[in-house]
Amino acid sequence: MDYVIEHFREVLLETVPLMEGAQALLRQDDESWIIAFNDEAVLELHVDDRLHKLVLSMALGATKEHQRATTYHALLV
C-alpha cells in the first residue's frame, strides 16, 4: 500500500497546481491531504486502508430551506 500512497502523492503534486483556484496542498499525515482553494473551500482527501478507497470530504455549508430535500437526496444517492 505504501507504493500506492506514494504514487497518489506524486499525482497530487502534479495535478493540484493545474486546478483552477487551488492555493495550497497540505499533507496532514502519511495518508491525508488538504487542498485549499482561493474561495475558502477546503477539500480533504484520506486514503482508507481498510476499504482500499480514497475518501473525499468537504464542508458544504447550510442549504436554503427550499433546496434541502433536493440537496439531501443528491448527497444520499
Image (tube, helix red, strand yellow):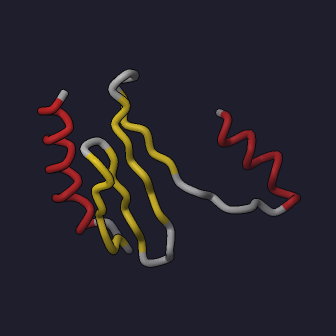
- Residue 63 lies, in percent from the top left, at 76, 60
Q: Quadrant of the C terminus?
A: top right
Above or below: residue 76 compared with residue 65: above
Task: Tell me which residue sits at (68%, 42%) in the image.
Answer: 74
Left or right of 54 on screen, residue 68: right
- Furthest toward the bottom, the residue is 38
Q: Which quadrant does the N terminus fall into?
A: top left
Q: Is residue 16 left or right of residue 56?
A: left
Residue at the far right: name it.
66
Against 7, residue 22 (above or below) is below
Q: From the viewer's perspective, tell me whether residue 62 is left or right of residue 7.
A: right
Q: Vertical placement of 47 versus 41: above or below?
A: above
Q: Residue at x 45, y 45 (%)?
A: 56
Which of 22 and 46 lies nearest the eye of the viewer? 46
- Residue drawn at (81%, 63%) of the image: 64
How far across and how far down the image is residue 35, in percent? 37, 62
